[in-house]
Structure formats: structure tokens, C-alpha cells
Image (spheres, rainbow, N blue to C red):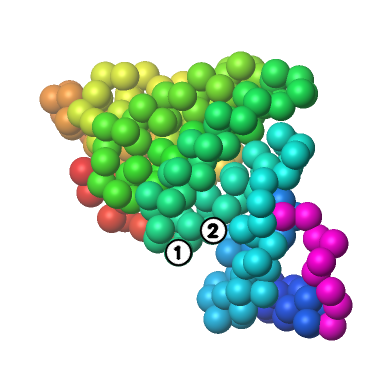
Amino acid sequence: MLKEHKQASESVQFISNALQSSTTDGMAPWLATFVASSLLILNDSKSQVNEVVTMLEPIIHEERSQKAIDEKLRLLHLGHICSDQQKFVDALNHWEEALEIEWDMLSATEMIYNGIIYLQMAAVYLRMNNKTQSLKAMEKAKTSLEYYYPSTHQMIAGMNLMYGYYLMLNEKTAEAIDLLTKSLENSHFSTNKAFLWVVLTLLAVASLQNGDISRAESFCDQARAYPVPATIPLSAFDL
């Protein structure tokens, strides 16, 4: 983990030095937002990342590109930047604008991009404590991504886990249990102990919410077979 943090820090420093020693006039706005957004995900050093984001700021907010795909990508990543800065309303506005853009590409590709946007919107609505809107966004994400990915794909398993959690937050426990069970049955995660622990723990909580104590105990017993993941905050399951 320390090695990964060091590499991420070195990457940010390299990009910062490159931007300072060369002109950014020819950089496309979508590429600038992609670089800034990616650094926010990969690096924990906010001061380093903010320095790069500040340098790219004029390009990030340039006027719309004539290419629909470029503008959709710019708005997608700009929304993520705003979300990281806790400018949640701005993030949602950028993503809503991105969803309105249609491009001349395969419909499946556009559905995937829209699904990714809806997933991010769901997370932001949840951070705003708007559980109803977060669930609606998650439903749209599921519809978009299922258009392309088969039910056996690992993407669907992960999404079923998230969707099940959002259903629990909205007290739709029967539907949550069904989706979480499907996620548990996906072969891609059959040996992933962290994933299995999370799903079984959520199933135990959902069963309690549904008044099925016996089933909750069964899921708890199964979850005990796996170590508690160090990177999963237990507060996430304080429902």
C-alpha cells in the first residue's frame, strides 16, 4: 500500500512538472478534466492534486466542444471533480447536462457511459442524505448497464450489491435480499472473501429488517467464516 501511495505521489509530481515546463494550449478540455479527475481518485495528497487541478482549471471550464463525445466526457469528469470538492449540486448539474447529450456512436456504448453517470449521481444523492433520489438514480444505472452486461458479469454482481444496499436504506428489504442473494451467487466473487463478508453482512441486516431472525442468524454464521475487511467501514452498515 505504501508503495502504491508513493507511485501515485510521484505521478502527480511528474504531471505537475510537465505542466509547468510546457504549454497546455493544445490540451483538449475533456482530457484536462480526465487528468484532474483521475488524480483525485489515485492520490491522497490533496495539496499536490489541487495544484495540478488549479493549473488545468482554465482548460477544464473552456467553452463547449463541437464534438458531443468530448463534451460528454468533460462533463462526466467535471462532475466527479465537483463531487470531490463537495460541490454536490454542481456535480449533479454537470451530470444531468451530460445525460442530455446524444452522440453518434453505438447505443450500447452510450448506455454504459450513462450508467456510470447514474452510479455517481446515486452516490452523491446519498451523501446529500437524499435516499429516495439515490435509489432512483441507482435504478436508472441498473437499467443502463444491464442493457450491455449479461447477468453473470462481475459488473452486475457489484451493482446488485450496491443496489441492494440502497434498497435497504429505503426499507425495501424483500427486494434487497433478492438482489444481494443474486450478487452472492455470482461466480466471479466466489473466492473473494471481502466481497462475501460484505454481502453476507448486508443479508443478515436485511433479514433482521424483514423480521426473519432465523435467516439473519444463518447469514451471520456464514459471514463469520471470513475476516472483516480492513477497508470496509463498519459504519456503512449502521442502518
Q: Which residue is mark 2?
A: 81
- Seen at 54% across and 58% down, the residue is 81
Query: Which quadrant is home to the C terminus?
Result: top left
- Seen at 48% across and 57% down, the residue is 82
The amino acid at mark 1 is Gln
**Separation of marks 1 and 2 at Cα, in angstroms:** 6 Å
Residue 8 lies, in percent from the top left, at 69, 72
The numbered mark at residue 129 is: none
Quick check: 8 above or below 152?
A: below
The numbered mark at residue 85 is: 1
Quarter occupied by residue 76:
top right
Q: Which residues are magenta?
A: 21-29
Q: Is residue 138 left or right of residue 150?
A: left
Query: Which quadrant is home to the N terminus?
Result: bottom right
Quarter occupied by residue 186:
top right
Q: In the structure shown, which secondary structural element does the residue marked by tag 2 occupy?
A: helix
Residue 100 lies, in percent from the top left, at 55, 29
Is 26 part of what is drawn in magenta? yes
Q: Nearer the viewer, residue 185 or 75?
A: 75
Q: Is residue 239 left or right of residue 15?
A: left
- Seen at 76% across and 23% down, the residue is 104
Q: Is residue 47 left or right of residue 3?
A: left
The answer to whether the residues at label 1 and label 2 have Cβ atoms under 8 Å apart is: yes
